[in-house]
Amino acid sequence: MALTLYNTLTRRKETFRPIDPGNVRMYVCGPTVYDYAHIGNARPVIVFDVLFRLLRHIYGEKHVTYARNITDVEDKINARAAEEYPGLPLNDAIHLVTSKTEKQFHADIAALGVLPPTVEPRATEHIPGMVRLCETLVANGHAYVAEDHVLFDVSSMPDYGRLANRSLVDMEAGARVDVAPYKKGPMDFVLWKPSKPGEPGWPSPAGIAALGRPGWHIECSAMAEQHLGQVFDIHGGGIDLVFPHHENEIAQSRCAHGTPVMANYWMHNGFLQVEGEKMSKSLGNFVTIRELLETTKFGDRSWPGEVLRLAMLMTHYRQPIDWTSKTLLEARLNLLRWVEAVRGSDPRDETVSPTVIRALENDLNTPEVIAELHRLARLAKSTNQDDEPSSAANQLVWALNFLGFGSHKDLLRINEELDHAIDAALKTVIEKGITDRNAARKAKDFKEADRIRDELSAMGIQLKDAKDPATGEIVTTWEVKR
Ligand code: AMP
Ligand code: ZN
């Protein structure tokens, strides 16, 4: 089967045809480095890591170039640096904040089993490319200079809004009234802006005398151009980036290079919310990758990186994820069942189940992959352990390895880490499930009763009903499916 991917640009699933199979090129917008990455930030990192692994499998390791940038110049970074190191010159403080945060980010995502991308460009190392793009856009009439800013003139691009599927007329009608007075049109956006004294600044383009710094969108246009060329294959990021960030990257790159597209396939992961709500500091449900790995802040326990990775992949990447302790418990039990199934095996020939590859080739259908892993685990368990090492166990080991869960040795280590005891948090979830199910049955809502039973079953918990001979009442007990 051929690889098919959902393309935000055309709003349908398309067969993936690389420009050059000898060098398949993908760009993903990376983090702005001023604080610990939250678990929502981990979603694009994990999703596109899976795609990177799949592309390498299809085209060969040496034939895929994956660029994921680091945004190290941005207002939020300046604010954080001034707050954290008030005594230092701002530029020194910024350097401390960005280098520290970058290290934290790398450690966090390594714990999630994420491969390093081929290149990890930093915005501050690509300023000349951004200046060049600004110069070109001013020279060819797509941008203008006003009050030391360079602004992109959206009216100069007939199909501005195509990615977001919005018309310029509608966007302008909805634009807020407090538009900066120097803009010709309300949707025009900043390519370059003047720096305040003490802020990071570079010699400006287009004859502007003041020192300045780039806008956010131009950073990605310049880094993608330098590492992947003017037109490349896949551009990814979270769904929140479609507008304005990606729309504006497209406008800048296409108008500077005179190309019909910037990238052929635009992919966006759905949003992650926590316990049913948008993650935010004020709601108190903001959770970083580091907190999940190292503290008991979420779900009263810390979680191995593999559990977090699996929890992320149990939902299809385009669907929203509700990040709950229940999801993590389910992921943990799944992982436990799989590592148990491969414990006695002696994996040799490296073969990844074709069913796993086919499911991934179908727009990264990871829920289908997980169903296949369960099938392999069941098969491995039912195979007589005295026989030849089970080929199902072998396939399960290699599938998990392919998906970023490490080698057979790593899986055995995970087995040690995942304490087998059912912890208090899980007990509470199960007992509440049983009470709710009994209440539903009393009310003759059998659909709801079955839904609860299936939900617990998906978490690896089997319910057993038996009549109490003394009272005639149904008593429900539970056990962990092995
Ligand atoms: P930022 O540092 O906010 O620019 O985000 C870095 C990446 O994380 C981008 O690709 C965002 O789209 C993505 N992202 C941020 N928040 C979430 C979330 N709650 N769920 C999924 N992706 C997110
Ligand atoms: Zn970007």
Image: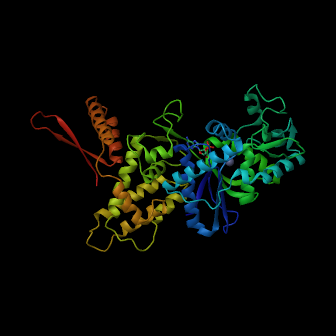
Horizontally, residue 321 falls left or right of residue 79, namely left
Image coordinates of residue 162 in percent, x first then y, are: 72, 43
> Which residue is painted at 52% across and 51% down in the image?
108
Image coordinates of residue 94 in percent, x first then y, are: 67, 44
> Which residue is painted at 30% across and 35% down in the image?
432
The N terminus - image quarter = bottom right
Horizontally, residue 278 falls left or right of residue 395, namely right
The C terminus - image quarter = bottom left
116 shown above or below 152: below
266 shown above or below 198: below
Q: Describe the colour scheme in one phrase.
A: rainbow
| In front of the other: 126 or 430 | 126
Q: In the picture, residue 388 is in which quadrant?
A: bottom left
Res. 247 visible in picture? no
Q: In the picture, residue 371 is in which quadrant?
A: bottom left
Image coordinates of residue 469 in percent, x first then y, are: 10, 38
Outermost residue toward the left in this view: 470
> Which residue is painted at 35% across and 64% down in the image?
342
| In front of the other: 122 or 163 | 122
Res. 31 visible in picture? yes
Image coordinates of residue 451 in percent, x first then y, are: 35, 39
Horizontally, residue 357 falls left or right of residue 136, namely left
| In front of the other: 195 or 355 | 195
The number of discs equals 0
Outermost residue toward the top in this view: 177
